[in-house]
Image: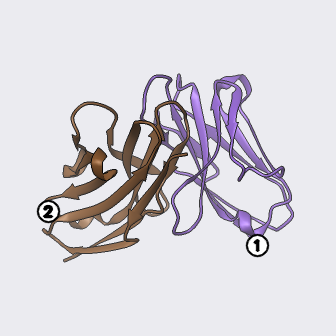
Chain colours: A brown, B purple
Amino acid sequence: AQSVTQLGSHVSVSEGALVLLRCNYSSSVPPYLFWYVQYPNQGLQLLLKYTTGATLVKGINGFEAEFKKSETSFHLTKPSAHMSDAAEYFCAVSERNNNDMRFGAGTRLTVKP
Amino acid sequence: DTGVSQDPRHKITKRGQNVTFRCDPISEHNRLYWYRQTLGQGPEFLTYFQNEAQLEKSRLLSDRFSAERPKGSFSTLEIQRTEQGDSAMYLCASRPTGTTEAFFGQGTRLTVV
């Protein structure tokens, strides 16, 4: 079965600094990969996804992620952090032949002024 | 609002009581998912419907939990004889067949006292 590991439960950056949130996945078949953001007491909002094709995926709010099959990674980046980026971020994987999306434990991003 | 709607947003109940949550998916989304999210963790898959058929259940879904989706529209999740360990955020998501993006509701936060 597929699984996701998010390295670092908390990441703190200064406003304007690079954001890097790490995600490694395990899947026996080609995966679909997702990043979601969650604000306090809210549901999850999709930031971006990888299904097929280009391995560098651009999402909303200036975020992007690169699918690296050789490293089984799908790290999320943003060149310049904004205060409004402070939230919980979840990486998720879904195998193409089933419907069960598995989430990582999440990374809480703090942005310092 | 055409997003996924969950009701209630918050529920406080005494241990041993039964509770029922409702999810209204985006219309024409034939796939509906329930997840449970505990504090500091990512969402955990509970169950999945395609139209009115419940096609997959996680081992997390004990016999105290039951989910239905009559007529393939809204869904309900019932927890009988609630326990303190049931305290969590219960998230509902929906998506159309043939797509990869799941849209999440804002969740129902259950507190068992």
- Contact between marks 1 and 2 (CB within 8 A): the answer is no
User: Where residue A76 appears, x then y in whole percent?
Assistant: 27, 55
| Nearest to the observer: residue A108 or residue B4 | A108
Q: Secondary structure at mark 1?
A: loop
Question: Which amino acid lies under the numbered mark 1 shown in the image of this protein?
Answer: Val
User: Where residue B21 appears, x then y in whole percent?
Assistant: 70, 47
C-alpha span from label 1 to label 2:
43 Å
User: Where residue A87 appears, x then y in whole percent?
Assistant: 36, 64
At x 37%, y 73%, the residue is A10
How crowded pointer 1 is (Cα within 10 Å; few <14, some 14-19, many 20+) is rated as few
Apparent side of residue A10 relative to residue B23 in the rendered image (left or right): left
Q: Is residue A81 above or below residue A103?
A: below
Name the subunit of mark 2: A
Apparent side of residue A19 relative to residue A105 in the rendered image (left or right): left
Which is closer to the viewer, label 1 or label 2?
2
| Nearest to the observer: residue A22 or residue A12 | A22
Apparent side of residue B104 relative to residue B38 in the rendered image (left or right): left
Tally of numbered tags: 2
User: Where residue A25 appears, x then y in whole percent?
Assistant: 41, 52
* Residue on which disc 1 sits: B113
On-image quarter of the C terminus of chain B: bottom right
Name the subunit of mark 1: B
Which numbered dot is residue A80?
2
